[in-house]
Amino acid sequence: MNFRILFAAALFPLAGHAATIDATLVATGRGHVQVDDVTGRVHGQSGYFGSGFGYYADVADFVSGTGRVATELSPDGAYGSYYGVSNGIVLARPDQSSTVIASYDATTGAQIASSDLTQYCGANFSCGFDWGGFSSMNILQDQTGMYLLGRSSAATDEWLLSSIDTALNVTEITRFARSGGNDGYGIMIGGTLFLGESFGSGLITTAYDVLTDTLYDPDLILSAGSYLSSSFYDQTSDTLYVASGTSGEQTWAVTGAADAFGVTSPVPLPAAGWLLIAAITGTAALRRRRTAA
């Protein structure tokens, strides 16, 4: 078992000046979406409440707002603002408070299968990102795959990150304690998870590289609206799209995202930094556990 300290920026202020990543407002009224890594379609909905699901043929149509096709997910719809989409299959939450994840045909909307992941906490507002928003179990996706992020059912301050595929196979990657409880939002680029301090702040206080098992302080500020509620990464154009607003009223874009977020060469926090944080936070610790696929 490998122990590290995961900290909240409020307890340990960032040294120096954080690098600012500027985003450009590219669309309004598009909602919360995810791009299919195989078909290129962009799937999602406005709001959190299980209706209004649909897709655009590609990212260009999504940005321009043309050619949207309605594909309601049946029978339950999708709750939350984060989805997984790959090869014509959508992964979403069919219920607003349970620990079930379901798969759907992305064209017809018909449910294919579901799985109750009781290792997660499904209760909204008390278990999710700090804005509630029916995001207590969040599916984040990039070119390395799909990941399920949420509060663990084992402890109130423990978070769990797993890999998940369209057949709903789940493999645990890591468990970690997050001082202060809730995170603000999540971003996945190049196999690295970035966690924002608050939905109302662009400050990104923690990053975890899944591929190298590296936890570090990215020291970044994302300038993309004032209510960050979902994101998706388009690997074809290396562009990160961030939704701002409770229903994704604004869509912001970061071009050259991999370089902007520094995912090719993450810099671990120096050992002295971890020791100082340990003295401050006491019991906040990261517990990592890998399981065979």
Image: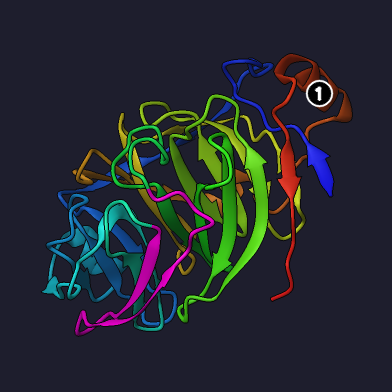
Q: Give the residue at mark 1.
A: 273
* Residue 30 horizontal/vertical position (percent): 19, 54
Foreground of the two, 262 or 11: 11
Q: Image point 74% across, 15% down: which residue?
A: 280
How are the colours assigned in the image?
Answer: rainbow
Q: How many marks?
A: 1
* Residue 119 horizontal/vertical position (percent): 54, 56
Foreground of the two, 192 or 3: 3
Q: Is residue 120 magenta?
A: yes
Compared across the picture, whether 224 is left or right of 50 comes to right
Foreground of the two, 93 or 188: 93
**Relative to 149, is 182 above or below?**
above
Q: Image point 36% across, 45% down: which residue?
A: 123
Magenta span of residues? 99-122
Q: Is residue 240 magenta?
A: no
Q: Is residue 256 visible?
A: no
Query: Hey, what amino acid is under mark 1?
Result: Gly
Which quadrant would residue 103 be assigned to in this image? bottom left
**Relative to 16, is 195 above or below?**
below
Compared across the picture, whether 100 is left or right of 264 comes to left
Q: Image point 31% across, 29% down: which residue?
A: 226
Q: Is residue 104 visible?
A: yes
Which quadrant would residue 39 be assigned to in this image? bottom left
* Residue 141 horizontal/vertical position (percent): 48, 62
